Image: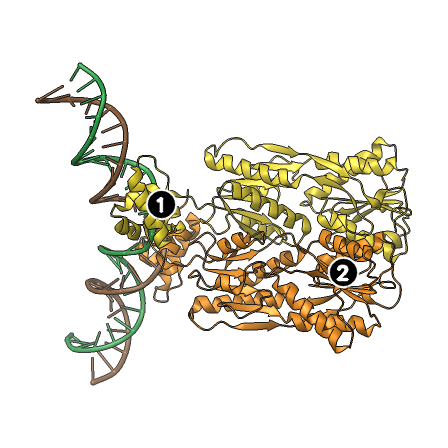
Chain colours: A orange, B yellow, C brown, D green
Amino acid sequence: MRHRLKDVAERAGVSVKTVSNVVNGYVHVRPDTRARVEEAIAELNYRPNLSARNLRTGRTGVIALAVPELDMPYFAELARHVVTAAGVHGWTVLVDQTGGGPEQERVAASGIGDHMIDGLIFSPLALTADDLTGLDGIPMVLVGERVDHGPADHVAVDNVAAAREVTAHLIGLGRRRIAAIGAQRTPEGASARLRLEGYRAALAAAGLPYDESLVAPAAAWHRADGAAAMRRLLASGARPDAVFCFNDTLALGALRALHEARLRVPDDVAVAGFDDVEDGRFSVPTLSTVSPDKEVIARLAVELLAGRLAGERAAPARELSVPYRLELRESTEGRAQA
Amino acid sequence: MRHRLKDVAERAGVSVKTVSNVVNGYVHVRPDTRARVEEAIAELNYRPNLSARNLRTGRTGVIALAVPELDMPYFAELARHVVTAAGVHGWTVLVDQTGGGPEQERVAASGIGDHMIDGLIFSPLALTADDLTGLDGIPMVLVGERVDHGPADHVAVDNVAAAREVTAHLIGLGRRRIAAIGAQRTPEGASARLRLEGYRAALAAAGLPYDESLVAPAAAWHRADGAAAMRRLLASGARPDAVFCFNDTLALGALRALHEARLRVPDDVAVAGFDDVEDGRFSVPTLSTVSPDKEVIARLAVELLAGRLAGERAAPARELSVPYRLELRESTEGRAQA
DNA sequence: AACGTTGGTTACAACGTTGTACAAACCTGG
DNA sequence: CCAGGTTTGTACAACGTTGTAACCAACGTT
């Protein structure tokens, strides 16, 4: 059976509150009393009932991480880092899978598990700042891209700068017909919009024209979408000599489609991605990509949340930028690999 | 602010318990009363306090899924399916990342979040049946491989049969020097032991010798381990003409190492994996693999847990076998791809 | 007309914890 | 050895919910 404070108290011959004080590390408990209580705790294998504690204190020790899809490598890797970072604060992480739809995301944002959660780290795909404004819910930190300044703390890499840089690198390699895969015309595709902006900026800076026929949309950012977009691009006769994919899974799909079309990477077409997921380090060829520091993203998100929970609920929203670097691998290198 | 039953009750002009009855779908509430209460609930945007409810009922509506690593594709995909399956029962899933170490797994098994969780779906890596016996904790369902009959319900594919089948397929292609990657000598590596057993059985059935020098150990089952093992195998002069990797990530690493060694797949070396993760469908070449029905695994695990929660806590442990099929792709096909 | 039966609602207690208020025991220094 | 404070411990109430028992009203039955 589960034991309660009362059981421990009886065994140790003290009051319930004294046991509670020991459990919570209250200072003014005589050493011998503390020892007796701790012994009783150990003997009974007592564990506090978190629901009762939460009911009393309003804290659960659980935070939620809401991501669109758990099996997209980027989110899986992010989740791992968040779980680790939260562990430092003694928090358990409840991972919620929103599916990326606006309605499900709204549900997630307005409080998963309702009162079971102290705070939320949220990686929205469909929701905009407007959707989030006025949610009286629990403290929230946004992770990933978002266009305008919303009501919550926010951690992300500078998408425009990173996209510009990677595109500029492709241009520096002598490529001139650089395609982009992953564009989204929906008002929600914030990441897509920012990365496209960076792509265009790099083209403009190099004096290259912006060619709509080189920009391929992708509804989702899975491998299959990347492959399909690449095939469409090739079939259209657009003849790109490089492709910037808005994330790595798109790029991995594109690599596959190029392979099927008997085109060599990087000789015929150079490919670059975004996210630096594990897969890209072992693909054939290995994938050049923008590598955001996911560990830092996770740690900052957790720390911002910790700040909110520690006090300043109403402080103005903060925007934190996370470092990234270009990870150059075979898919953009000069010498042949495939 | 958050509202309570009491607030709703005052607004609707009824007692607290009547509101509770409406919320819980109790039958004997007059339609007009129910309407008045529901209106008040909507107006105040009332949501039950789960901690309080749990404290009273002993149920939280949250189950935990404990996996070794969230960013191993197999577990990420499994997690997605478990979240979906649990949603059918109205449960939220708390995903716990154990890291795969024995001590952390013991902690997870003995009750993550202590009282916050109704049940646990556990995919152990290091823990054996003995470790789990005698845990008086919450209801638990094991997912994945395990050798002997333990104290908890268990869902898995028949590892031996699946490994035998995939190895037999390689033999059927005319391969004779078939390597295995992923062996583990630790007492914990249950999956490794079973898959090795199937591999040996297939060799024996075909009258092929079991050659220790063709069996490469791998401490973990990541891409890097697969690549390293493959390199060692090639450097050893063992000259395999096929490789059965004990999971897909190992196989993807092996593909990479073979590519670097300028060996063609499948012409020089055929490669097969296990798990059928998304990556293998887009790799170059695409990966032949054993495809366990992850959706069924997740659904069965959730249903077994539901059974335990619904009543028969003390019923004898059940063992469920999940269907799988061989997914044959380029990495074992006769015609050249790379 | 008195009766049990059922439907609809309510008051109360309890789940296990911790904050508040206070009492008892213990120290210090004059 | 006593006034003053500090340390150590206790009793009680409250967090928001639901199960139990009880009540009143309306009903059909005898």
Residue lying at 63% horizontally and 51% vertically, measured from the top left: B68
The reply, left or right, for residue B84 in relation to residue A192 is: left
In the foreground, A294 or B212: A294
Disc 2 is attached to a residue of which chain?
Answer: A
**Residue B100: x and y, percent?**
63, 51
Q: Which mark is residue A281?
A: 2
Please say if A47 is above or below B167.
below
Q: Which mark is residue A329?
A: none
Residue receiving disc 1: B56
Q: Amino acid at mark 2?
A: Arg
Please say if B87 is above or below A117.
above
Q: How many numbered marks are there? A: 2
The reply, left or right, for residue B123 in relation to residue A116 is: right
Q: The C terminus of chain A is located in which quarter?
A: bottom right
Residue lying at 80% horizontally and 66% vertically, measured from the top left: A329
Please say if B315 is above or below C15.
above
**Residue B262: x and y, percent?**
90, 56
Q: Nearer the viewer, mark 2 or mark 1?
A: 2
Q: Amino acid at mark 1?
A: Arg
**Residue A96: x and y, percent?**
54, 53
* SS under mark 2: helix
Disc 1 is attached to a residue of which chain?
Answer: B
Q: CA distance from mark 2 to mark 1?
A: 51 Å
* The quadrant where residue A218 appears: bottom right
Please indicate, yes or no, whether residue A292 appears anywhere in the rendered image. Answer: no
